Amino acid sequence: MSVTIDGQSLRVESVVRVAREREQTQLNPQARERVEANWSALQKMLARGDVLYGVNTGIGAFGNEILSAKEGAELSRRMIRSHAAGCGNPLPEEESRGSLLLRANTLAKGYSGIRPGTLEAMLALLNAEVTPVIYEKGSVGTSGDLAPLAQMALVILGEGEAFFQGQRMSGSEALEKAKLEPILLEAREGLALFNGAQTMTAIGTLAVYDAERLAKSAQIAAAMTIDALNAVTKALDARLHSLRPFEGQNKCAENLRRLIEGSEVLKQPKRDTQSAYSLRCAPQVIGASLDAIAYARKQVEIEMNSAADNPLFLTEECECLTGGNFHGQPVAYAMDFLGIAVAELGDMAERRVNRLLNPALNAGLPAFLVGEEKGLNSGLMITQYTAAALVSENKILASPASVDSIPCSADQEDHVSMGTIGARKAREILRNTERVIAIELICAAQALEFSKPLKPGKGVQAAFEAVRKVSPKVTVDRPFYKDIENVTELVKGGAVVAAVERAIGKLR
């Protein structure tokens, strides 16, 4: 199989297939024709003497400097070199590959003034698994992700650095080993390669995909805790939720009902008339996160299929439009919102962990879920500390990046989005929250041991069995970091969700 790009139909799942699973990609023939026609239109504009920003002028604060045709081609090379000024650690290869794919898809729309061969050279890098080394820091998110995408573009020229077959090497060596030729750029093509928000969008796209799966794991963990604590389930009644028709809330309530269906534990007498918010309001809070994640998906899918650079060239009208489609604000907001939404999944999960472990709150379960030798054994006490630390870190990371702006390029670029920072923060929040949900799964599974021989809900039982395959019942203290690592892998890789969906069908 392969992913075909045409500038308008790329989806989150397609990006995952190319970026993570290294699926081959190709250019749609009609898109190639559009790109070719657009390049011809650009040559006509140059031939009639049009002044075209970034083609026969300088860029940024030098946008009023007029250049000759020969200088325009040299500008393409020099601007890539000068803009490759990032720093920090390299992005994970999947995010670099995502950046390359998304930039190619934008160019495939046929408005960016680039030769088809240059676009196809980008796809050749993906297909040969030559991954540009892109440093994670240095983008302000307007005029797109300049520093990271310029570093990406260096490899197309046979410069910079790349990963090939697991090794980091020079861009020229990577091309040689992959039997690829560097591209000699013409006027305009340099700016076309890096003038967009594709790095933040690539990071965000992968984060959205992971967040959707994590949200399912969060609902499974919540259902396990509800079951283990014999919570009051009237709060999940479909009639109640239908009176407040938020889509995410109603989906979550339905999922929780399905997960706990058939529970013998929940048929036992209740201690309370209603449960605490972390149990009772799970649909309202997790559901709000589901809606926010859905919004983030919508925004990144719009962005990945947009003509998102400057200038843009209209083929039929043979006209150049300069503007600001590179501005990352729509994605920046979405990334900040995504980070907040995922942070709240962890925030509420940590409160449920506390209820499972605290003898004043856990419906008669042993303190810290220690069955024997209390005092000698600490049980799962410190897992809550870890969850608390992760949640606290998330609260700091969730502070929005998009409300900040530092003017650049001699105040020509006097408002920027900081969206790439927001995307990286969202990704870090996601990784932290995966661990928090893993800790809740560990604690809830241990709590369910004390309900035996009563059986939990069918979906909860499936999750319990998945956890137990990598995290055994706690009978005596052991180093629990291994359990956290093992269960986090179940969450991150989707194994818990898969086990549950095999048992009760697909979660909404």
Image (cartoon, grey):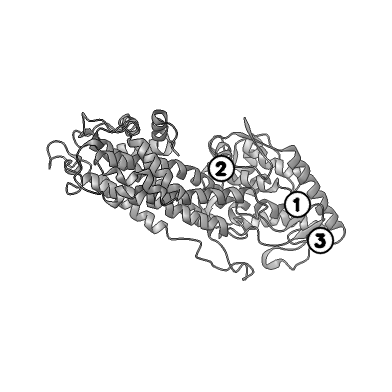
Mark earlier in primary sequence (3, 1): 3
Give x and y (percent) for residue 162. Answer: 59, 43
Q: What residue would you read off at disc 2? A: 12
Q: CA distance from mark 2 to mark 3?
A: 41 Å
The residue lying at 17 percent from left, 49 percent from top is: 360
The residue lying at 22 percent from left, 48 percent from top is: 273
Using the image, determine if residue 500 lies above or below residue 153: above
Give x and y (percent) for residue 416. Answer: 57, 64
Q: Are marks 3 and 1 in contact (CB under 8 Å)?
A: no
Residue type at mark 2: give it.
Val
Q: What residue would you read off at disc 3? A: 68
Q: Nearer the viewer, residue 132 or 13?
A: 13
Within-10-Å neighbours for mark 3: few <14, some 14–19, many 20+: few
Quadrant assignment, res 45: bottom right
Could you tell me if residue 363 is visible in this image? yes
Residue type at mark 3: give it.
Ser
Disc 2 is placed on an element classified as: helix
The residue lying at 83 percent from left, 53 percent from top is: 43
In the picture, the quarter occupied by the N terminus is: top right
In the picture, the quarter occupied by the C terminus is: top left
Could you tell me if residue 182 is visible in this image? no
Disc 1 is placed on an element classified as: loop
Give x and y (percent) for residue 180. Answer: 69, 37
- Outermost residue on the bottom side: it is 411
Q: CA distance from mark 3 to mark 1?
A: 17 Å
Within-10-Å neighbours for mark 1: few <14, some 14–19, many 20+: many
Q: Nearer the viewer, residue 373 or 82?
A: 373
Relative to 56, is 253 on the left or the right?
left
Q: What residue would you read off at disc 1? A: 113
